[in-house]
């Protein structure tokens, strides 16, 4: 689940946190770095739990309407398609999700205002009305309604970041990519797998875990070497005048380009340009692009860089 794009973002965030802290204990910093990755994994499970929470809320709303003093015919015989969603029922029984939530005790119980708001947005959406008017039950439709809820409501929500920020300061930076992981998970579900359906693992394999550790530690251990290269490339600037985030993004990028094998230079190059556009100034993407290009070109001239 934690792919390399997110690992790079996490490294930049945590290298920044390392230099902002009073202590410079690399082992402790690396532990905190992996803790931040675990928190991103928490967000993945928390958003999956939201499916169950909204479904339960919808069920309670129908029950309340049916049990009021003078219910309408529609309230006495409601359309139960949304709350009887087979995909959501399968997710509720998923062994991995149940175990994770039981261990972490995560809950949306204190976010009832947000749950109500999301549910009302669902009710007013065109894709919900289309789903509810389908004549036949369909597992794929039960999956797709939830993918659309995440894509069209939750991913665009202005309230969700505020809700998440109360619980973890890093979650909002992770939100967009974790939502894509949730939508990918929804699509991967198969009815025949039942409660044993696999969810996305924290790391795809051991190589991604090693990539995370190596990138974080290299970026800090080899700071002086990387900054010398940066300084040489921006001779008309004093390195202290560079935007701190630009400097750290360059430092992490060089940690990957110079000291991690198996990743083409242009892949690393493009990844850090994208990070700069999102996490630094408007001109940072261009600056990172030019600086990395200068450094790579010079190292190739000196026969100090042989990666493709």
Image (cartoon, rainbow, N blue to C red):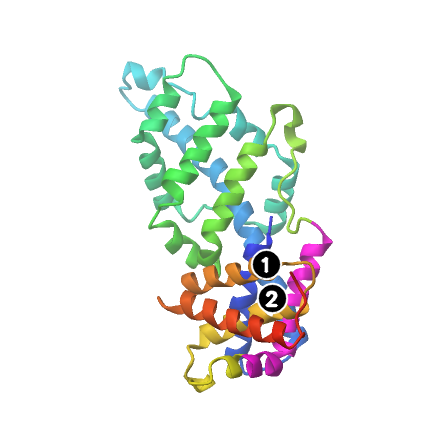
Q: Is residue 78 above or below residue 240?
A: above
Q: For mark 2, give the secondary structure.
A: helix
Q: Name the residue under label 2.
A: 33
Which residue is depicted at the point 65% across and 33% down?
197
Q: Which residue is drawn at 73% across and 54% down?
A: 206
The image shows residue 68 at horizontal and vertical percentages of 31, 24
Q: Is residue 135 above or below residue 299?
A: above
- Residue 285 position by quadrant: bottom left
- Residue 180 is situated, as x and y percent measured from the top left of the image, at 49, 44
The span shown in magenta is 205-229
Q: Residue furthest front?
A: 301
Q: Main secondary structure of the magenta part?
A: helix
Question: Are the residues flagged by discs 2 and 1 in contact, CB closer than 8 Å?
Answer: yes
Q: As rendered, which of 117 and 265 lies closer to the eye?
A: 265
Q: Mark 1 points at which residue?
A: 37
Out of 224 and 268, give the one closest to the viewer: 268
Left-right relation of 51 to 193: left
Residue 39 makes an appearance in the image:
no
On screen, residue 193 versus residue 70, left or right, reads right
Whether residue 135 appears in this view of the structure is yes
Residue 233 location (% of width, % of height): 50, 79
Residue pictured at 42% horizontal, 49% vertical: 110
How far apart marks 2 and 1 lie (CA) works out to 7 Å
Does the segment drawn in magenta span residue 103?
no
116 over 257 or under it: above or below: above
Q: Which residue is drawn at 55% across and 56% down?
A: 6
Q: Which mark is residue 5?
A: none
The quarter of the picture where the C terminus appears is: bottom right
Picture coordinates of residue 215 (x, y %)? 63, 67
The stretch drawn in magenta includes residue 208 = yes
What kind of element bears circle 1? helix
Crowd band around label 2 with a 10 angstrom C-alpha radius: few (<14), some (14–19), many (20+) = many
């Amino acid at each position: 689940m934690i792919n390399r794009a997110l690992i790079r973002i996490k490294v930049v965030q945590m290298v920044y946190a390392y230099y902002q802290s009073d202590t410079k204990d690399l082992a402790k910093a690396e532990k905190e770095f992996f803790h931040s990755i675990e928190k991103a994994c928490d967000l993945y499970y928390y958003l999956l739990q939201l499916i169950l929470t909204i479904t339960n809320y919808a069920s309670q709303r129908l029950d309340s309407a049916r049990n009021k003093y003078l219910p309408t015919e529609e309230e006495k015989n409601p359309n139960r398609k949304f709350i009887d969603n087979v995909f959501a029922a399968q997710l509720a029984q998923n062994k991995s999700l149940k175990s994770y939530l039981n261990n972490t005790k995560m809950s949306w119980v204190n976010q009832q205002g947000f749950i109500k708001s999301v549910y009302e947005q669902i009710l007013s959406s065109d894709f919900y009305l289309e789903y509810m008017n389908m004549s036949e039950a369909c597992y794929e439709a039960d999956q797709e309604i939830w993918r659309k809820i995440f894509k069209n409501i939750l991913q665009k929500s202005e309230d969700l970041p505020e809700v998440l920020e109360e619980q973890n300061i890093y979650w909002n930076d992770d939100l967009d990519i974790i939502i894509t992981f949730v939508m990918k998970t929804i699509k991967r579900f198969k009815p025949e797998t039942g409660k044993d359906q696999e969810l996305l693992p924290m790391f795809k394999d051991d190589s991604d875990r090693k990539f995370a550790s190596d990138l974080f530690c290299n970026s800090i251990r080899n700071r002086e070497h990387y900054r010398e290269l940066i300084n040489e490339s921006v001779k008309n600037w004093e390195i202290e005048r560079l935007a701190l985030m630009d400097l750290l993004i360059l430092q992490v990028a060089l940690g990957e380009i110079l000291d991690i094998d198996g990743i083409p230079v242009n892949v690393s190059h493009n990844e850090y340009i994208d990070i700069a556009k999102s996490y630094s100034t408007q001109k940072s993407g261009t600056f990172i692009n030019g600086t990395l290009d200068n450094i790579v070109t010079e190292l190739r001239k000196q026969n100090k860089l042989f990666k493709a």
